Image (cartoon, grey):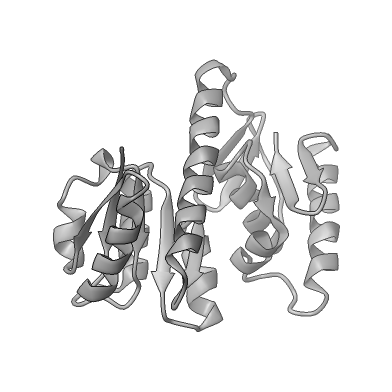
Amino acid sequence: MINILMIEDDTEFAELLSEYLAQYDIKVTNYEDPYLGLSAGVKKYDLLILDLTLPGMDGLEVCKEVVEKYDIPIIISSARSDINDKVEGFALGADDYLPKPYDPKEMYARITSLLRRYSKSEHGKVAAPKSDFELKGDTIYFKGEALSLTPAEFEVLSLLVKHQGITQSREQIINTSRAMSMDSQGKSLDVIISKIRTKLGDNKRIQAVRGVGYKLV
């Protein structure tokens, strides 16, 4: 059974989603109060579904605290349509963002896809050598040497480092970066990746996944 922690103040919505997911052997435990949700033993759950508009504490604050303390995939489920909320959610470490309203089928698909990626990543870490990359504050080290990066290069590479071995879509990378130009973002991303590869001195560390995005290996 998959155990999911949900922090959502719309109890009717939470119940409907819980009932739908139950048929797939997924148990959802919901807390309306974010403080109760954070004290519920986050690490015992497989995934967190997080609303943003919550009583007493904004969902982005919850996201930040969870990312800092636990290694658990996060799907933001919110009716807030401001692109800045989406960008900040990804920047804080959320893995996915599903705007309300949505069909429960889509949430189920995203849950299974995300858990499958996390499972493969964790499996790979068992036998994988220590990463050549280290993220400390606003600096990324490669093989022990600090990289000189522009703000956009840092945002892109830090996302790839945090999810090393997992393909990140072009949309997710672009939405996460606040420093990238709003014009011709797709082209800008390709240019930034090229510059990062040059600074790494190794074109093979960042792989292009055709039709999807990029992956750090």
Which is nearer the eye, 44 or 192?
44
Task: Indicate the quadrant where residue 57 lies.
Answer: bottom left
Placement of 97 over or under 10, stated as above or below: above
Q: Residue furthest front?
A: 23
In the image, residue 214 lies at what x, y percent? 74, 48
Q: Residue at 15% across / 52% down in the picture? A: 39
In the image, residue 200 lies at what x, y percent? 78, 39
Q: Residue furthest top?
A: 127
In the image, residue 62 lies at what x, y percent? 30, 63
Q: Residue at 49% across / 33% down in the picture? A: 119
Q: Where does the N terminus fall, quadrant-wise?
A: top left
How many dots with numbers? Answer: 0
Q: Is residue 180 visible?
A: yes
Q: Is residue 48 left or right of residue 122?
A: left
Q: Is residue 151 left or right of residue 73?
A: right
Q: Residue at 47% across / 61% down in the picture? A: 105
In the image, residue 129 lies at what x, y percent? 59, 19
Q: Is residue 93 left or right of residue 143?
A: left
Which is nearer the eye, 30 or 159?
30
Placement of 94 over or under 205, stated as above or below: below
Q: Is residue 175 left or right of residue 104?
A: right
Q: Where does the C terminus fall, quadrant-wise?
A: top right
Q: Residue at 75% across / 53% down in the picture? A: 212
Q: Is residue 151 visible?
A: no
Which is nearer the eye, 204 or 21?
21
